[in-house]
Image (cartoon, grey):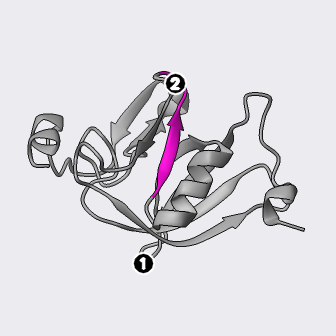
Amino acid sequence: MSFYDKLKFDSNGLIPAIVQEQKSGRVVMMAWMNRASLEKTIETGRTHFWSRSRQKFWMKGEESGNTQTVKDIAFDCDGDTLLIQVEQNGPACHEGYNSCFFRSIEDKGETFKTTEKQLLTPEQMYKKK
């Protein structure tokens, strides 16, 4: 039995992929994968995802140069979420932060704060490729 048989893709053929920096344990992003993007990730050792808004495949870092080298891929007990451990090269967030999760909710949801320093502006990120 293939591990693919244990995975539960949604009605659109997608599964959420949580991406974690292996060394720090920090979650840096979440994106969607379909079977083809998961296969490409396994084949190349670089993360590939499916864009729901653009309806196309994309490789993390293909435009910014901030790639992710895959170190491990795991799936949860329900088979409906992937955890991908990576070596992150540069900021993971397209807004130039190390993690896409750089804001925390405060005051019972009334406000939020930025919890990390912006490493690059989006203009700097997409110019440096």
x and y percentages locating residue 32 in the rendered image: 58, 40
Where on the picture, by quarter, is residue 108? top right
Task: Say if the magenta span includes residue 89.
Answer: no
Picture layout, residue 82 above or below residue 114: below
The residue labelled by disc 1 is: 23
Mark seen at residue 7: none
Q: Residue at x 60, y 53 (%)?
A: 38
CB under 8 Å between callouts 2 and 1? Answer: no
Say what secondary structure mark 2 lies in.
loop
Task: Say if the magenta span includes residue 49.
Answer: yes
Answer left or right for 112 relative to 91.
Answer: right
Q: Residue at x 47, y 36 (%)?
A: 105
Q: Amino acid at mark 2?
A: Gln
Disc on the earlier residue, 2 or 1: 1
x and y percentages locating residue 52 in the rendered image: 55, 26
Say what secondary structure mark 1 lies in.
loop
Local crowd size for mark 1, using a 10 Å CA cut-off: few (<14), some (14–19), many (≥20): few
**Number of marks present in the image shown:** 2
Between the residue at mark 2 and the residue at mark 1, the CA separation in whole angstroms equals 32 Å
In front: label 2 or label 1: 2
Picture layout, residue 15 above or below residue 70: above
Q: Quadrant of the N terminus?
A: bottom right
Q: Residue at x 42, y 27 (%)?
A: 111
Is residue 15 in sight in this rendering?
yes
Q: Residue at x 18, y 36 (%)?
A: 122
x and y percentages locating residue 80 in the rendered image: 78, 49
Tell me which segment is drawn in magenta. 47-53
Local crowd size for mark 2, using a 10 Å CA cut-off: few (<14), some (14–19), many (≥20): few
Q: Residue furthest right?
A: 1
Q: Amino acid at mark 1?
A: Lys
x and y percentages locating residue 113 in the rendered image: 35, 38
The residue labelled by disc 2 is: 55
